């Protein structure tokens, strides 16, 4: 009889952690486990694929994003949920440490081996955890495994919760096989023509939810500076994502008279295809774990400019441009504008960075090798538990 792994998560499928969850669930099924996911109800290509593979879903009757206190605080409801599923192992997939509290507390109280995966450990949010610091420290100490996506995030987690150096391991973010496909030149021409992008333009591409944490205000401020430079005539920005800043971004672009140089696609499921049209990938985020968006761009061979946030630098490992840590909007925008202008003028540098990034993605971030690490964690825990 196959063993049951229950994943509990607040993440939806359109964000990076949700896409990683889908890859882990698929890997569990392939390894012969019964894979069950408890999350907000949604109907996306990822869910439909997983259901066809045999995954099971326990839909929450509320949205954790809209009611995070309930998701993080209702231990009794989590206990009932876990009992209904009857798992041999509980896998908590967190988008931030505070969200997993109830699920971890419930699983540990039921003496079920528990894995905690932290997608982002953000320094500016950790002080909010002080009321539960002692309990959460106990969670990490008693978990069967703690996973972070970058060494920077793991070090921050250990320092804040005063954890021993042997608690936790790093499993990096992954890029699906589709991102390693070579650029389709016909698709590139078709996409750029559809966006009204002139031949010879430099396309700066970003895929991320439209929220401040992803650095869109930095990009807007950088665009204001680039508009005063000769290179502006050759630049076009494509932003793929949806979120709370959508209206603000559209209004600001209109005020700047920059709408002809920026395409907003909304959320898309074909990022691997859209990257064919890109010349530079931008992610000037304020906090990160290790974003899939960066390793996906690397896999496609698109050179990356990113801020020194979370595991961005670890992902690139010298294969792209890492900007200085964020201090203020003016300096961040100036640094980003300068980096874009430099690469826009140097096709050879862009090509070299793209090749280096693709090589690193092949050796560190291919989905199969990353998922093997997740399955090894699950298998080792269940074997040690006599299951």
Image: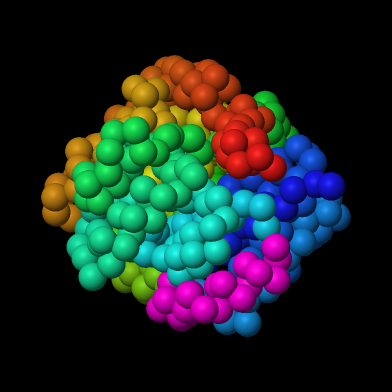
Whether the magenta-drawn stretch holds residue 265 is answered as no
Q: Give the farthest residue toward the front.
A: 386
Left or right of 199 on screen, residue 252: left
Please give the name of the residue rendered at 54% of the width and 58% of the height, measured from the top-left corner: 111
Where does residue 139 sit, x and y in percent of width and height? 39, 56
Q: How far across and down, in percent of the image, does residue 133 sit?
A: 25, 62
Q: Which residues are magenta?
A: 65-86
- Taking the image as drawn, is residue 154 in sight? yes
Is residue 99 depicted above or below 381 in this figure?
below
Q: Main secondary structure of the magenta part?
A: helix
Give the colouring mode of the picture: rainbow
Any part of residue 216 in sight: no
Left or right: residue 263 versus residue 249 is right
Residue 334: image x %, image y %? 19, 45
Which residue occupies 72% across, 53% down? Answer: 4
- Which residue is more in the foreground, 177 or 352? 177
Above-or-below relation of 67 to 286: below
Residue placed at 18% from the left, 55% from the top?
329
Q: Position of residue 25 (x, y in %)?
A: 69, 49
Q: Is residue 82 magenta?
A: yes
| Location of residue 165 with respect to 126 vertically, above or below | above
């Amino acid at each position: 009889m196959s063993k049951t792994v229950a994943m509990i998560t607040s993440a939806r499928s359109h964000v990076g952690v949700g896409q990683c969850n889908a890859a882990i669930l698929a890997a569990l099924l392939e390894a012969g486990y019964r894979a069950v996911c408890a999350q907000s109800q949604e109907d996306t290509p990822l869910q439909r694929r997983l259901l066809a593979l045999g995954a099971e879903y326990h839909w929450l009757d509320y949205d954790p994003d809209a009611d995070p206190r309930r998701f993080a605080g209702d231990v009794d409801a989590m206990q009932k949920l876990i009992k209904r599923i009857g798992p041999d192992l509980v896998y908590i997939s967190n988008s931030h440490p505070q969200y997993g509290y109830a699920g971890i507390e419930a699983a540990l109280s039921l003496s079920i081996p528990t894995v905690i995966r932290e997608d982002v450990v953000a320094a500016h949010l950790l002080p909010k955890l002080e009321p539960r610091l002692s309990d959460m420290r106990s969670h990490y100490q008693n978990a069967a495994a703690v996973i972070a996506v970058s060494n920077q995030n793991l070090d921050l987690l250990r320092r804040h919760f005063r954890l021993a150096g042997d608690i936790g391991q790093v499993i990096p973010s992954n890029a699906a096989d589709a991102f390693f496909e070579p650029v389709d030149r016909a698709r590139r021409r078709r996409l750029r023509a559809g966006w009204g992008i002139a031949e010879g333009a430099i396309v700066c591409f970003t895929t991320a939810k439209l929220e401040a944490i992803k650095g869109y205000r930095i990009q807007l401020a950088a665009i204001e500076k680039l508009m005063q430079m000769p290179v502006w005539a050759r630049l076009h920005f494509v932003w793929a994502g949806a979120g709370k800043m959508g209206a603000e971004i559209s209004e600001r672009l209109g005020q700047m008279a920059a709408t002809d140089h920026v395409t907003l696609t909304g959320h898309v499921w074909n990022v691997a295809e859209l990257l064919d049209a890109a010349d530079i990938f931008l992610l000037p985020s304020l906090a990160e774990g290790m974003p899939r968006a960066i390793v996906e761009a690397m896999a496609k061979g698109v050179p990356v400019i990113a801020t020194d946030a979370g595991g961005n630098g670890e992902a690139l490992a010298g294969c792209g441009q890492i900007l200085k840590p964020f201090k203020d909007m003016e300096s961040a925008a100036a640094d980003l504008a300068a980096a874009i202008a430099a690469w826009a003028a140097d096709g050879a540098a862009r090509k070299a960075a793209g090749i280096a990034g693709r090589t690193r993605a092949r050796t560190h971030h291919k989905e199969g090798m990353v998922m093997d690490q997740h399955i090894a964690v699950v298998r080792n825990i269940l074997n040690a538990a006599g299951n």
